[in-house]
Image: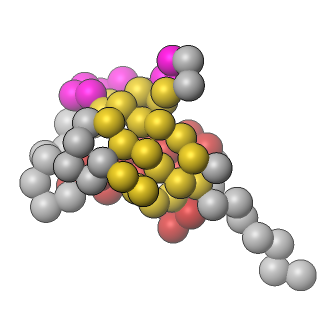
Amino acid sequence: MHIKIKVKVGKKIPELRGEELIVYTVAKMEHGQANIDVIKQVAKYFRVEQGSVRIVSGLSSRKKLLEIREEQDPR
């Protein structure tokens, strides 16, 4: 599944607006800290492991496209 993300500064919980998820962070935009925080919040929002979430595009932008991989049943 792919999801469009818009990153804003703040300490609010993520909120869905139309087809875009607004994610708030106070992490610095240096050394990927904000991206790590965004991934953590998106994983928590969708109740998946952090390893299942990756940024497809927009690494240095406030608008990002993320991929959330479905959990595979090990059976």
Q: Decide: is 19 above or below 29.
A: above
Q: Decide: is 28 above or below 31.
A: above
- The residue positioned farthest toward the bottom in the image shown: 75
Q: Is residue 37 left or right of residue 43?
A: left
Question: Which residue appears at 42% of the width and 36% of the height?
Answer: 5
The colour scheme applied to this rendered structure is secondary structure
Observer able to see residue 44: no
* Relative depth, front residue between 2 and 9: 2
Q: Decide: is 51 above or below 9.
A: below
Residue 58, how many percent across, how many down? 30, 48
Observer able to see residue 6: yes
Residue 9, how many percent across, how many down? 22, 28
Q: Quadrant of residue 23?
A: top left
- The residue positioned farthest toward the top in the image shown: 17
* Relative depth, front residue between 72 and 60: 60
- The residue positioned farthest toward the right in the image shown: 75
Q: Quadrant of residue 22?
A: top left
- The residue positioned farthest toward the front in the image shown: 57
**Which quadrant would the C terminus be assigned to in this image?**
bottom right
Question: Which residue appears at 36% of the width and 42% of the height?
Answer: 64
Residue 63, how many percent across, how many down? 32, 36
Question: Which residue appears at 40% of the width and 56% of the height?
Answer: 55
Q: Is residue 19 magenta?
A: no
Q: Is residue 75 left or right of residue 4?
A: right
Q: Which residues are magenta?
A: 8-17
Question: Which residue appears at 72% of the width and 64% of the height?
Answer: 71
Residue 41, how many percent across, how many down? 44, 44
Q: Is residue 64 left or right of residue 47?
A: left
Q: Decide: is 65 above or below 23.
A: below
